[in-house]
Image (cartoon, rainbow, N blue to C red):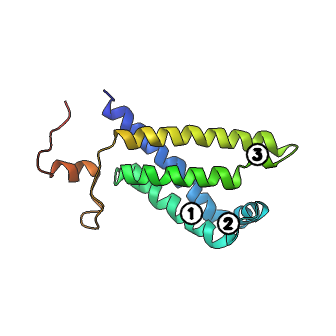
Amino acid sequence: MVSSVTTTIGRILLGLYFLVPGLSKVAGSADMVAYMQGHDIPFAEPLLWLAAIVNIVGGLFLISGRHVKFVAYGFVVYILMVNFLLHDFWTMEGDGVAHETQNFVKNLAILAGLLVLAGSSAARNLSLSGWWRSDGAVLRQQPGFKAPK
């Protein structure tokens, strides 16, 4: 059985992993746009702002325990896209290969953590009603809810 304390700490750390880079994208947008354009990403600037919003909002949702399963699976898709579009070490030569390989593998580890978090989180109906409430608070109100021992 997974400890709720360790799950909570892991969820918060994963949330921070997305929140902090989201804020960095806002603070250093010109550098990030140039990086994306260097990888031939079309519409780099609007996609950067979309990624920043997704990182910030998703990170805050993970930290606060809202829609954890949905957000974790969303970040799995996000990481796969980032890995194959930006950390494409197999297309490079020279100094950048080792750095991008490291980023690619690191992201796979984050992806694994997200899958574990999603798999251990209770499903919650997607609804705007009560979206601000934690998953635990919403699930406790569902008929047949049994508190973990």
Task: Name the image quarter holding residue 129.
Answer: bottom left
Give the SS element for disc 3. helix
Q: Residue furthest top?
A: 1
Which residue sits at x=39%, y=44%? 118
Which residue sits at x=34%, y=50%? 65
Crowding at label 2, few (<14), some or many (≥20) Cα neighbours within 10 Å? some
Q: Position of residue 113 (x, y in %)?
A: 48, 38
Distance from Cα at disc 3 to Cα at disc 2: 23 Å
**Residue beneath disc 2:** 29
Q: Nearer the viewer, mark 3 or mark 1?
A: 3
Q: The residue under label 1 is which amino acid type?
A: Ala
Sequence-first tag of 3 and 1: 1
Left or right: where does residue 28 sit relative to residue 114?
A: right
Q: The residue under label 2 is which amino acid type?
A: Ser
**Residue beneath disc 1:** 52
Q: Which quadrant, please, contains the N terminus? A: top left
Question: Is mark 2 in CB contact (under 8 Å) with mark 1?
Answer: yes
**Residue beneath disc 3:** 89
Q: Position of residue 93 (x, y in %)?
A: 86, 45
Crowding at label 1, few (<14), some or many (≥20) Cα neighbours within 10 Å? many
Q: Relative to residue 11, is residue 74 depicted above or below?
A: below
Q: Relative to residue 42, is residue 136 depicted above or below?
A: above
Q: The residue under label 3 is which amino acid type?
A: Phe
Q: Which quadrant, please, contains the C terminus? A: top left
How many numbered tags mark residues here? Answer: 3
Give the SS element for disc 2. helix
Crowding at label 3, few (<14), some or many (≥20) Cα neighbours within 10 Å? some
Task: Name the image quarter holding residue 90.
Answer: top right
Front in this rendered view, residue 7 or 105: 105
Q: Position of residue 62 (x, y in %)?
A: 41, 50
